[in-house]
Image: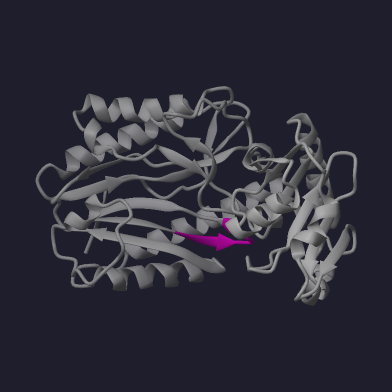
Amino acid sequence: MSERHLDRIRRAAKQVEADEVDALLVTPSADLLYLAAYDPPPLERLTCLVVRPGADPIMLVPELERPRALASPIGETIDIATWRDGEDPYAALTPLLPEAGRIAVTDSMWAVHLLGARRARADAEFVPGSNVLAKLRSIKDADELELLSRAARGADEAFRQLTDSRLEGLREEEVALLLGSLLTEAGHESVSFTIVGSGPNGASPHHEPGGRTIRAGDPVVLDFGGRIGGYCSDLSRTVCVGDPPRGFQEVYEVVREAQEAAFQAVQPGIAARDVDEVARAVIEGAGYGERFIHRTGHGIGLEEHEPPWIASDNDQSLEAGMTFSIEPGIYLDGRFGVRIEDIVSVTETGAQRLNRASRDLETVA
């Protein structure tokens, strides 16, 4: 484990140098977990991995967390520096930083820590670390792809079991709890989110499940996910309780066609925005362009949302090993919503779906 993460840190150092950055600061986050296999909670006490070209990595931690840092997979293979409560952690950080130049910081660094680092090195330019880390994290290795595939299969199984359940008469919040239980039964170690939007609530893409009782004729948007081995699942399907309402099947078929067209467009070298455009063109051609109100997809890995963004403003070229969602949707205010989402991976010749759940319209009791 430690050698794998040391290799990631070495590659990060090379990318730092290639980007003409003098140091990369990584505080508790998915970035720190990815690089160092260390996952302390983000706190007011500063923990910071410092990656520098041509120098050994070093991690600064509070003295009281030194035993935990040493016990981590990377703990005995990199230097651990400490600071004590009552001391200025940024004074301890100062000698680890270049006196000037460019310093990249992880996107999730707390503002208080960024401001402290800027006081420590007032002559340095601070820049986003995502330019460095996204290039590494967006390309998944075989082990990461296996964990993402396991997570996707677990989400598929949870959906399969849900469609065998009776939804009519349940409240949205009850279905959300059921989904969480099914994810756990299907191997997920934690549940991250469960969106259940029934009837008109489905027109809100991030609807919070509430007390609305699901009735016959309701379309229900289900969007849910969790983690296996730290890696995320994220699946969306739209089902109908009994016979669908007027116009629903037409909208459903448009979304399904858009999702399939975007999937077929994925291949190495295509721009992310072009995949978004393929899905959008189908929906616009059917007259629902104004009701597709979000991007087509987002990257996924240690975080539910991470690069690459499958969006109209992203000209990044896709590469083999990238994983992301394809999730077009149509949302008709006061009536219903439809969204279909799979996680896919880019292969050497095209794309592969990690989710295998049926995309046919499911009618449930």
Report the span colored magenta: 225-231
Q: Name the one closer to the observer, 135 or 235.
A: 135
Is 6 inside the magenta-drawn segment?
no
Quadrant location of the N terminus in the rendered image: bottom right
The residue shown at (23%, 34%) is 290
154 to the left or right of 250: right
Which residue, as the protein is rendered here, is positioned at the far left? 246
Q: Is residue 16 visible?
A: yes
Q: Quadrant of residue 103?
A: top right
Q: How is the image coloured?
A: one colour
240 sits left or right of 125 in the view: left
Quarter the C terminus occupies: bottom left
Q: Quadrant of residue 151?
A: bottom right
- Residue at 29 percent across and 66 percent down: it is 209
In this view, 163 is above or below 349: below
Residue 25 falls left or right of residue 165: right
Using the rendered view, name the quadrant where residue 92 is placed.
bottom right
Reply above or below: 186 against 57.
Answer: below
Question: 153 or 53: nearer the eye?
Answer: 53
From the top left corner, tell me how far across and down residue 299 is, in percent: 53, 43
Magenta stretch, main secondary structure, is strand
Depth order, front residue of 53/122: 122
The one nearer the camera, 13 or 101, is 101
**Picture layout, residue 143 above or below residue 211:** above
The reply to whether residue 37 is in sight is: no
Position in image of residue 188 (x %, y %): 54, 66
Instruction: Locate residue 277, reporting x and y percent.
Output: 38, 26
